Every structure is written in C-alpha cells, then in structure tokens.
Amino acid sequence: MRIVVADIGGTTIKVAIVNEEGVLTQYTEYDTESKKGGAYLVQKLMNILKGFLPFEAIGISTAGQVDTKTGTITYANDNIPAYTGMKLQELLEKAFHVPVKVENDVNAAALGELHYGAGKEQTAFLCLTYGTGVGGAIIMDSKLYRGANGVAAEFGHIIVHPNGRNCNCGLKGCYEQYASTTALIRQVQAVDSSYQNGRQVFEALKQENKKIESVLSQWMDEIVLGLVSLIHCFNPSVIIVGGGVMEQSQVVEEITRRVRKQVIHSFSNVTIKQAVLGNRAGLLGAASLHIRHDG
Ligand SMILES: [Zn+2]
C-alpha cells in the first residue's frame, strides 16, 4: 500500500510516502505560507499531493483541533487564518477519490511513537511536547484517547499556579506558562537578556554558569509538578517527552530522578523517555491511521 502523508504546521508542510511496514520515503518540506490563509493552504496541499501520485490513501497530521469523524478543522488559531471550519477530508476525497484520514498533530505524533517509536510495546502512556506551549496526547489500551469532543489531553492548560501568569487561553497559571521552552527562555532572559534560545542556555550550562543553572533547575521543578499529577491520574508505564529541549538527555535524566522522588510509591516504576521519531512522528502517525495494527 502506498500512503501519501502530510504534516501541516504553521511554518512547514512535510510530505512523504509511507508503505504498510511504516517505511518512509520521498520526504519533502514546503513552506506553509500560513498567513495566506486556510483556503490557499488547502489548494497548495492539493497541488503538492498531485506530485506524489499514484497513492491509495491520504493521511494528514495538522495543527489545530480536528473532528476526526469528518476530518474537519474545528479550531485553528491565528497562525493559519481562516483554517477553522476547513473540511479537509471531504475536499481531499473529492479531489483524489481515495480514503482520507485527518488527525491533530500532537495525537498523530503519539500514534507514530506508539507504532514505530518510543511507545512500541507500551499500552498506556502519555506524550508531552515542550515548545512554544506544551502539547499532550494520551494512549490508553494501545489506542489514542480523544475525549468527548476530540480535544482531550490539553496538558498545557492544567492550572498549576492559582492566579498565576496570564495564558493565551484566557486562564491564569497554566502549566505551559511555566514549563514550556518559551517560559524557560523568558526566565533566563530575566537574568541575562542576551539569551535568545535553548541552545545558548545549554551552552551556558557547559560553562557552569550558576545563575542559568538555577533558572533551569526551577524550570525542571515546574515540569515535574505537572508530570507528577499526570502520573497520579493516568498511571502510565512511560511518559514520552519531545521538543528540542528534551533532546538534552541530562534534562530527561534529572526530570526522571525528581519525578521518582515525588510520586506516591506505587507509581515509582514510571519511566520517562525521549521521543525518538523527531519530525517523522506526525507523518508515521498519519500513515498508521490507514494501517491495521494487530496485537
Ligand atoms: Zn492556558
């Protein structure tokens, strides 16, 4: 089976062909040109997909909230104007006459890790991605748990500090305002405004910069605060953490150490693993929507 898959983000559209064994080929990236809006984006996607013909199915991983029954974008923020309401599945099925499945990008990445990555052989785990915000996905009984309206696992908006920092969701004190990479950089900049990104922060640590070490340690405490509650709620065997900062294995090791110290004893066998598929996770997850996974 030849499945064409696309991962639509605010900056790039990644496209590839995946076969039934989950082998990915013809990987190509395109500029999303997101500011031109949803209609332009869908047209652009169709033109790109034509270049990958022939194929027997289309799998889409996309930014925004998705009604997976109809493959419609139920909500997308202003990064892609007028993307909300786009009937992606219907439009693509009409154009290509093959089955189309659409899934939210964080969920798709979790499915990718489940079938082909760090979640293989695990039946109950959580995925958290730390970047501009904090994204989440829940795998229960080897399946994605989507919730009543398909928007479960918004871990970034768990309130961890009552009356805390303002969040763009309208609430105060949300987890992502303290535990995201953006939050880390903001706190580092309060100490030294010359820092612009995570890479510079980890360079400073190599030079044993005590001030930066202290900010990083407080940030890890914030990460752990959220994880401990999630572990008590879900009792996962594994938590898979992704995003650029989690490529630093010393960060993941330290978070694991602190989590194990804080959780109730009966939860202490939980492990924390780095996501392994990187930018291929969403594409493989989108393909997996068309592939039967027995056992
Ligand atoms: Zn929030």
Image (spheres, rainbow, N blue to C red):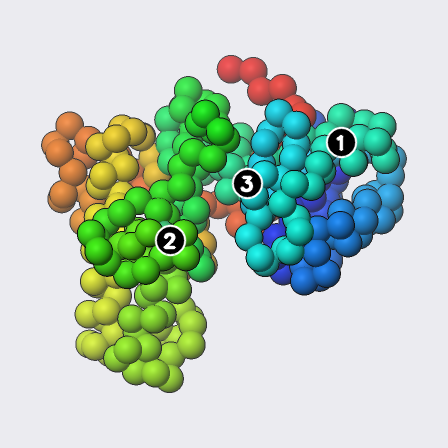
Q: Kindly give the residue lying farthest to the front in the view shown.
A: 170
Quarter in which the N terminus is drawn: top right
Q: Mark 3 points at which residue?
A: 65
* Residue placed most toward the observer, 42 or 61: 42
Q: How crowded is mark 2: few (under 14 residues within 10 Å), some or many (20 or more)?
A: few
Give the amino acid type for the residue marked by disc 1 in the picture: Glu
Give the amino acid type for the residue marked by disc 2 in the picture: Gly
Residue name at image x 58 percent, y 20 percent: 293
Name the secondary structure under disc 3.
Answer: strand
The percent coordinates of residue 58 (x first, y second) are 74, 34
The percent coordinates of residue 121 (x first, y second) are 43, 26
Name the secondary structure under disc 2.
Answer: loop
Q: Is residue 240 visible?
A: no
Q: Residues within 10 Å of mark 1 (few under 14, many from 20)?
A: some
Q: In this view, does 57 lie to the left or right of 189?
A: right
In which quadrant of the rendered view does residue 215 lie?
A: bottom left
Which of the two discs, 3 and 1, labels the residue nearer the N terminus? Answer: 3
Q: Name the residue under label 1.
A: 90
Q: Name the residue under label 2.
A: 170
The percent coordinates of residue 172 (x first, y second) are 29, 54
